[in-house]
Amino acid sequence: MAKRSCLSDHSPRVSKRDYYHLNIDSLLESLLAVSDSALIEASFDGLVESRSAYSDQNEFIQRALHIGSVLLEVGKRYGRKLSSVHNASFWPLPPDLTIKVFSMLDTPSVCSASATCLFFQNCAKDPLCFANIDLAIPKVNVVVVTTMIQRARNALQSIKLVEVPPELSLNKQGKKSSILTRSCLGFLGANGGASGSHLKRLHLHNIKMMDNTALLASLSVCPSLVDLEIVGLDVDASSTLKFVSRHCRLIERFVFDLSKSKDSMGRLMKRRLFDDEGNFIGNSACEELVLNCPKITTLALKGCRLSDYNAHKLLKGFHELKYVDFSTSCFFSGSFLNKGDGNNLEVMILRNCSRLKKVEVKKLMKALLAGKFRLLRHLDISNDEDIAYNGHLEGVSAILIKQLLEQRPNFCLVPEFSKLNSVNHMMDDDLSSPTSDASSSTSTSTSSDSSSSMSTSTTSDSSSSTSTSSSS
């Protein structure tokens, strides 16, 4: 009878995979225990030279390179992991406060911080870090926007998308690196519109490929908007206003700008835009906006064909309106100005309104002296087209201006009439005081008052207007 081995039934069986695993562990430990790299290099040279065939040598070298690359990647991965543990232990803030700090940064800064280490990367994955998406930078496309919205999920509060001009967005090969398509906001409607339903602020600037259909589709899933900016998009004015009034009834700040871009001198490059029927704002659009969006405090309709009747309707209908900008309109004459509607209005911008009549401006001055627009503190009726001789203010009385600035010492009137080339163009026919005295009085009042006004402007247009006034 053959003897039985005492280990045959009781010793654990080692699988072939485990056997190789144990051998690899021992081999790696032995290899990493070698501190002299010259020994490893000499051993490798000997092993290569021991193979006589070229194919064998090449195969051995390729296997060595592959194993080396595997060890390099594994080492880097575990190095990042250990660094993350180290940073987490020495970083003074706990993860919740780190996420809070990240949520206060702009979007590019959060992305840069997340690439620093694994600890920051994990913190930056929190939806709060992408609650306010600001992508006014080059190299932005629909994939980037969608990714940011996916990361924000239900925490999404605001989105700002700006398509960079072509000369600033070219990559090294000369191709456009920023392409925001008409569907760049399509993910707002995903999952039943979960992300869009929480959105409060939406700013869209110069996205050339976004048409009227794509814009309205995006707005339809954003019922909670309180701040909406639409600048430089190829969309229809009336249909956009109607859609906003029906789907964004909580809106408080609405900026709709279809005006043309300007050159370095600040003058309008083209005026063909004003002939486009798409810029016309009809009566029904204004009526619906006033009826359905009563909370509007800031309203800018720039580059639109707005009639005097509708301009008056808007000023009269919005009882909480504080800031209004009807710049670059070539449609109204200004007959709505002397009616005095808009008791809460603080800022009025009527820059480059080519059909604004000087007689209506004169009536406005008299209305202001009579106590209308009692809260108005900033009025911009400037014109880039040489206002001193060809503009609409050449017949406005210097005495009216002087009286207005004396009655309202904190009032800012743009442009500064002291800088006009000839005061005679501002005088009424019945003006009896000397020209030099009127010029001196106007210069003193305007230059002292305009520098102290508009320190807290509601929008960038108001701020730039004030800068122009103070620098003049």
Image (cartoon, rainbow, N blue to C red):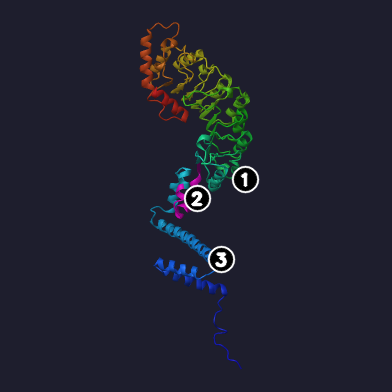
The residue at which mark 1 appears reads as 192
2 or 1: tag closer to the N-terminus = 2
- Vertical placement of 314 versus 2: above or below? above
Q: Residues within 10 Å of mark 1 (few under 14, many from 20)?
A: few
Judge depth for marks 2 and 1 and give the one in front.
2
Q: Is residue 123 magenta?
A: yes
Q: Is residue 421 magenta?
A: no
Q: Residues within 10 Å of mark 2 (few under 14, many from 20)?
A: some
Dot 2 and dot 3 residues touching (CB under 8 Å): no
Residue drawn 58% across the image and 41% down it:
185
Badge 1 element: helix
Question: What amino acid type is highlighted by mark number 3?
Answer: Ser
Residue 451 position, x and y percent, is 38, 24
Judge depth for marks 3 and 1 and give the one in front.
3
Residue 150 position, x and y percent, is 56, 47
The residue at which mark 3 appears reads as 55
Please report the bounds of the magenta region as a residue range: 112-133
Badge 2 element: loop
Residue drawn 46% across the image and 27% down it:
462
Badge 3 element: helix
Dot 2 and dot 1 residues touching (CB under 8 Å): no
Question: What amino acid type is highlighted by mark number 1?
Answer: Gly
The residue at which mark 2 appears reads as 126
Residue 25 position, x and y percent, is 48, 71
